[in-house]
């Protein structure tokens, strides 16, 4: 009996020793597995970091390569879409001509297709924003999308400065969702409305570029935007003006008024078009305009005229297109089936030839002969008073013919001159004519 008890006790002790040995071996295996798992996690994180850096370097190389070769590609796309025409090359090169003297230049215009936009977004009930986002299982709030140039944008806000569209993180940012295959460059500024109604800029005015071939379907821009896990060495302070959401909505905050936050973003967007060279012509070639003098010479030459005016037995040639465009009375005479529309000859009995020439000159050049130029037609030995009366009479006659042919602008010019010439000697004649022309 005693021997059996000793044997059984030894068996139990041996069994317990084996169990403990097995547990110790299993614990060592678990510790080794845990060490291996941690090492694998560390290696995986390192590989992820290296892949991110390699991807950034590869994208930079791709963008640089495309920047060197994208001009022909964009030109080909524009030609295919009928947006531009490639200048045709001459069959034979032109022979260079000798230029003895040249002054000119050109301007390289890089602001082609530059669009500017401004968007104001308000969030009411800021103290309830986190609850509203939690109910929708979202991390950020977004405004409606708006378009500036070829870009499509929205304003987004994350109260936790967490995940934003495109996998980036930040608090307040501009969300770009491209709907075309165009490269764009943009300059943006973000402002927050203060208690006193003024706009306070948050962060500097910044610039970014977007290449649709980079592989990112959408990106965000903002003062504290960063990639999760890849924050820069000098990370920006998270939150609007470095304030957390709770600090922003606190009673001491100067930016949330009546539980409402108002933001404004200003965008300048340039499409990826090549710059345009604009010739700068010598200034001497562009001084003034020759339209008035050319039209007067056209009237005086009589070339291509198709209408004749007979004024005091003097024939004056003119052009029906100009007359119809400038006077409703002439248009009716020359196009309404009246005798003048057939004969193309109009007889004038109630106007002096010189006065009618002044009318035609105004119709062609839209300019009125100055009083001093009219006075120069009077003989030098005439008295000043006689000269003044003669000029006044010319303007009175011109006012009458302008009224007859409904040339309103010429009427107003003549009236302004005659009003300025009111005197005891001229007031009766001017007043009598005013009564007749009422």
Image (cartoon, rainbow, N blue to C red):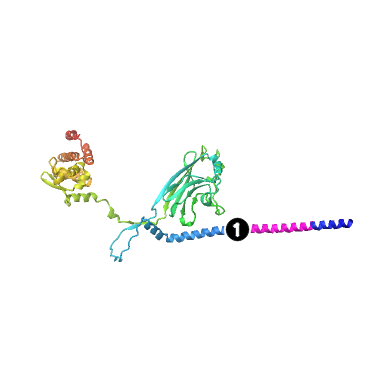
Give the residue at mark 1: 44
- Mark 1: give few (<14), some (14-19) or many (20+) Cα within 10 Å: few
Q: From the viewer's side, name the closer residue of 382 and 22.
A: 22
Q: Classify 16 as above or below 244.
A: below
Q: Classify 266 as above or below 421.
A: below
For the N terminus, the image quarter is bottom right
Q: Percent position (x, y) of residue 274? A: 39, 57
Magenta part, dominant SS: helix
Q: Is residue 377 visible?
A: no
Residue at the outermost right position: 1
| Magenta stretch in the rendered image | 16-44
Q: From the viewer's side, name the closer residue of 46 and 380.
A: 46
Residue at the outermost left position: 313
Q: From the viewer's side, name the closer residue of 320 and 285.
A: 320
Q: Percent position (x, y) of residue 82? A: 36, 56
Q: Is residue 64 visible?
A: yes
Query: Does 38 lie within the magenta span?
Result: yes
> In this image, 82 relative to 329: left or right?
right
> In this image, 222 relative to 80: left or right?
right
> In this image, 192 relative to 4: left or right?
left
């Amino acid at each position: 009996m005693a021997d059996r008890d000793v044997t059984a006790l030894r068996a139990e002790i041996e069994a317990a020793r084996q169990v403990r040995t097995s547990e110790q071996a299993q614990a060592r295996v678990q510790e080794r597995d845990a060490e291996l798992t941690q090492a694998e996690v560390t290696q995986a994180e390192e590989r992820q970091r290296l892949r991110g850096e390699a991807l950034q370097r590869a994208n930079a190389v791709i963008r640089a390569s495309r920047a060197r070769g994208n001009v022909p590609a964009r030109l080909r796309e524009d030609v295919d879409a009928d947006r531009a025409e490639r200048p045709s090359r001459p069959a034979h090169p032109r022979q260079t001509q000798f230029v003895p003297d040249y002054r000119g230049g050109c301007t390289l215009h890089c602001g082609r297709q530059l669009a500017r936009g401004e968007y104001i977004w308000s969030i009411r009930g800021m103290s309830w924003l986190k609850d509203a986002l939690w109910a929708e299982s979202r991390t950020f709030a977004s405004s409606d999308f708006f378009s500036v140039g070829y870009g499509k944008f929205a304003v987004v806000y994350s109260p936790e400065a967490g995940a934003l569209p495109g996998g980036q993180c930040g608090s307040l940012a501009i969300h770009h969702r491209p709907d075309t295959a165009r490269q764009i460059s943009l300059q943006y500024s973000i402002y927050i409305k203060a208690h006193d109604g003024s706009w306070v800029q948050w962060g500097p005015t910044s610039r970014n570029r977007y290449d649709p071939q980079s592989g990112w379907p959408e990106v965000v821009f903002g003062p504290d935007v960063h990639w999760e896990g890849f924050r820069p060495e000098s990370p920006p302070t998270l939150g609007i003006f470095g304030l957390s959401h709770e600090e922003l909505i606190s009673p001491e905050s100067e930016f949330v008024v009546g539980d409402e936050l108002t933001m404004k973003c200003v965008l300048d967007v340039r499409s990826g078009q090549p710059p345009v060279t604009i010739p700068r012509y010598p200034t001497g070639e562009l001084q003034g305009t020759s339209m008035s003098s050319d039209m007067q010479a056209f009237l005086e030459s009589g070339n291509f005229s198709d209408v004749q005016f007979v004024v005091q037995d003097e024939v004056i040639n003119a052009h029906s297109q100009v007359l119809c465009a400038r006077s409703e009375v002439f248009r009716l005479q020359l196009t309404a089936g009246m005798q003048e529309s057939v004969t193309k000859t109009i007889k004038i009995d109630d106007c002096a030839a010189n006065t009618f020439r002044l009318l035609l000159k105004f119709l062609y050049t839209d300019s009125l002969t100055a009083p001093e130029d009219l006075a120069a037609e009077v003989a030098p030995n005439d008295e000043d008073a006689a000269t003044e009366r003669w000029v006044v009479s010319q303007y009175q006659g011109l006012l009458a013919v302008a009224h007859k042919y409904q040339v309103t602008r010429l009427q107003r010019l003549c009236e302004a001159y005659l009003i300025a010439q009111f005197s005891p000697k001229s007031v009766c004649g001017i007043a009598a004519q005013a009564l007749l022309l009422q």
